[in-house]
Image (tube, rainbow, N blue to C red):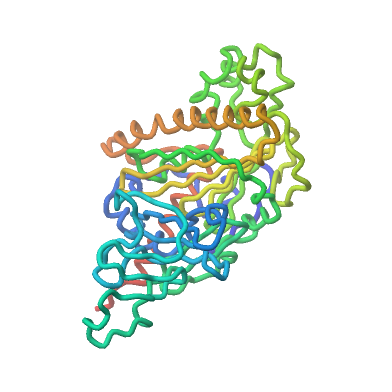
Amino acid sequence: MPRFPKPPAGSWTEHYPDLGTDPVSYEDSISPEVYELERAAIFTRAWLNVGRIESLPRTGSYFTKELAAANTSIIVVRTRGGAIKAHHNICRHRGNKLVWDDDPRAESSGTCRQFTCKYHAWRYNLDGALTHVQQESEFFDLDKERYGLVSVHCEVWEGFIFVNFAQEPEQSLREFLGPMVTGLEGYPFERMTSSFKYRSEVKANWKLYMDAFQEFYHAPVLHANQSPAQYSKAAAEAGFEAPHYRIDGPHRMVSTSGVRAWEMSPEMRKPIEDICQSGLFGPWDKQDLGPMPPGLNPAKCDPWGLDSFQLFPNFTILVWGQGWYLTYHYWPTSYNTHVFEGTLYFPAPRSARERVGQELAAASFKEFGLQDANTLEATQSMIESRAVDRFVLNDQEVLLRHLHRETAHWIARHERENAVTP
């Protein structure tokens, strides 16, 4: 896959000539046929993040993940040897879903010594080997070694667990991530043990929500009500532009400056922010996390706000300058629906005030996320009308061009490789 050089200052789009500057089509967000191609070309071939190792703290810890885009459910588990492994969540006997609680469609988690099927009590150890068959003598020449769980390629990078459903992945996980993303190595992800999670079912294509978080052109307008009127008016008139965009292989990032809320005049803040000493950018009292990796804050902003790394196809790591990070996942469920997950990670709070400050930051994020999501169904409904079939993008929306171009690239390659020769 091609990688792009870091561009010099100036217009960002012009330094990625393969992306062009023409109006773009959103057919890939309204076509059931394109969605089916994405499932085959992308979600069964790319590395997909499914969680973090903190969710698997001890031997036997596991969680399941429902992946409609890959048409499967998986079990991710920590084995007795300490390895992280993934298996398709299906019993080898009659195909029952192996691990589930009350609702077989819901995800589950827990700790166990082995996995036992609810249907006929076949048992598998944590490595996926079949260890017990009820009334084994009733079967015909059954070789248990041949009927272990079907494994899924699984690798861990910086505590993030990724899976790949290809028969043989084209690249190792680290090769797939490339130098821009691996430039985050050394960030203290493992210290961020205080977390808050939101999940929402969105009636819009998954790429449309990714687009909403790939530019800040909308921020002074869409989020105006979150700021005092005089500040919002001035911000909307002045506009906002991030100082750095970068594309590397299938991945993208945008870096932006920030604000020191505690240095703003009191009338520019909300009373709850003064009480909790926190807000959207996180708690004001930043913990000392040590030196940051070289891949952060490439524009050397002071103050620095955040860096948003969009990992193809559907995963975002957003690192805040105030010493915390969050992740976004966009899991397709159809051509015009998806599940959005947002998880915020903070260092362990040192006081009750710090804990409350983290909760305020999480609540502020939820409000902003709802505002971003609020436009999506309106967008989806109207682009499905096809009354307009080309849409203009500005220079700040260069990452949107790349996501849709990259999606088309993976589909085209899949079609070439699977073309039927007469």
Q: Nearer the viewer, residue 379 or 66?
A: 66
Compared to residue 253, the image places residue 360 above or below, namely above
Q: Nearer the viewer, residue 287 or 264?
A: 287
Compared to residue 271, the image places residue 219 above or below, namely below
Residue 57 in which image quadrant: bottom right
Q: Nearer the viewer, residue 203 or 186?
A: 186
Q: Is residue 222 found left or right of 175 in the rendered image?
A: left
The x and y percentages for residue 76 are 46, 61
The x and y percentages for residue 259 are 69, 28
Q: Nearer the viewer, residue 97 or 58?
A: 58
The x and y percentages for residue 53 are 56, 56
Q: Residue at x 45, y 43 (%)?
A: 341
Q: Residue at x 25, y 64 (%)?
A: 119
Q: Residue at x 56, y 21 (%)?
A: 236
Number of on-image labels: 0
Quarter of the figure that contains the C terminus = bottom left
Q: Is residue 68 found left or right of 265 in the rendered image?
A: left
Kindly tell me whether residue 17 is visible in this rendering: no
Kindly tell me whether residue 168 is visible in this rendering: yes
The x and y percentages for residue 178 are 60, 61
Compared to residue 310, the image places residue 365 above or below, namely above
Q: Residue at x 70, y 43 (%)?
A: 297
